[in-house]
Image: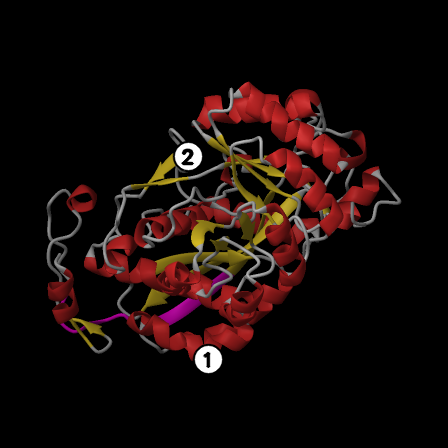
Amino acid sequence: MDRRDWMAAVSGAAVLSAGAAHPASCAGQEPKIPRGQSLTISRIKITPIALPDPPLLAASGCHGPYFLRNIIEIETADGIRGVGETRGGLTRTTALERARTRVVGQSALSYRSFWKSLRSLGNDVYAGIELACLDAIGRAVGLRVCELLGGPIQESVEFASYLFFRFASDHPQLINDMRIVDKRGRGDRALDHWGDVRTPESMAELAWNFHKRWGFTCHKLKAGVLPPDLELAALQAINDRFQGKHRLRIDPNGRWTPATAKRIAKHLTALPLEYYEDPVLGQQAMSEVRAATGLTMSTNMCVTRFEHIPEAVKTQPVDVVLCDHHGWGGISGCQALGKLAPSLGWQLSQHSNNHAGITMAGMVHVGAVVPELTLASDTHYPWLVAGADVIQGSNLPIRDGRIAVPVQPGLGVELDQDQLARAHEVYRKCGMRGRDDARTMRRVQPNWSRSLF
């Protein structure tokens, strides 16, 4: 449907008619929406879930046995449904429950107006509800989310491999964690079979296997875990494995001192480095390293919301910002950031944390509608074991390092209610209500602390 026609079909909060849907999604048939149908939200369901997480290592410690998410389902007075996903943990679940009373009775078409009443509850709360509203609107009129937001600039979005140092899934100190309530175990029953990755050689092998399986040609190393020179050697080993033909990134998550960051940077200039992400903490330190090294600097730590931009204009800490529709206030927030980025001299990529297929679909739609998002996006999605997602069917496929924009209306994914119920039951039983990587790390290294290298 032409956007002008669609806008003409919408009067206030009522959808009066609909034209042709995306041809790939509805086989050329026009959806018929009864005159006077309303997209008034009559019900919101919030479901906290826990999904299996391998023991990935980061500056914060070691991932626990599960990662937490909140699934949002909305239903309109006319039976149109929409689904969203946002960050997990009891604090956000409580905030989402508070948001319910502020949104029920409003039209899903007015989702942008929700920002004023929901922003105090958190950008990620608004983002999850916005996503569900966009999904519902798309289903109501037979259009994909990217089509609602101006049309896709591309039909597939590039992602980078996200490479973590890690313990084997059946590490003896970790497999005995009392929070584990599924049937994972040792050997053939291990959660996954990527094994222990804590040497340059094993990291290069991991990168190679990710490339063979999913086709990634851009690789991001999560650093800030092992001694910096060992992590540098790992990045060099990855480069050697691909004969210098693949793009590289490194992200110490602010766990290096400025002196260390500058020293390691001298060796990074010999690599096909796309960007140097958050080697140090704070805008001032990032600006210092940027000025001293001349490397392209990126962040998901010192510029993560619009309020940080004025200071960044003064300090000039980065060249690349990793947008995140959870943190920047929905897909609409990422679009707004995209409009600002060129005037600030910034390129855009996307940040990722552990997520399920609903967020994965949302990220693909972001990549399809933000022209300024020109760099491959991050994603944890390959680390989500097969059969654990809460969407129907297999995990969204990654081919040649890219994910195709779903062809069905809305987000293009369907919630699997049985899988959702199982993931909620795991949440209820495991007892995890927030992320605490340090606790898990201390099961292996009792004296571990997040000291700087």
Q: Looking at the picture, how far across and down is residue 357, in whole percent? A: 44, 45
Nearer the observer: mark 2 or 1; the answer is 1
Relative side of 129 to 30, left or right: right
**Mark 2 to mark 1 CA distance (whole Å):** 37 Å
Specify the principal SS of the magenta part.
strand
Relative side of 79 to 46, left or right: left
Disc 2 on helix, strand or loop?
loop
Q: Earlier in the sequence, mark 2 or mark 1?
A: 1
Disc 1 on helix, strand or loop?
helix
- Give the label on residue 117, or none: 1
How many marks the image carries: the answer is 2
173 part of magenta stretch: no
Quickly name the residue at label 2.
394
Q: Residue at 12% of width from left, 70% of height from top?
A: 8
Which stretch appears magenta? 34-46
- Give the label on residue 206, or none: none
Q: Looking at the picture, how far across and down is residue 347, in whole percent? A: 43, 52
Q: Residue at 35% of width from left, 63% of height from top?
A: 339
Amino acid at the residue labelled 2: Ser
Question: Where on the picture, by quarter, is residue 82?
Answer: bottom left
41 part of magenta stretch: yes
Q: Residue at 35% of width from left, 72% of height from top?
A: 112
Question: Where on the picture, by quarter, is residue 221?
Answer: top right
Q: Looking at the picture, how far across and down is residue 304, in whole percent? A: 54, 62
The answer to whether residue 446 is seen in the rendering is: yes
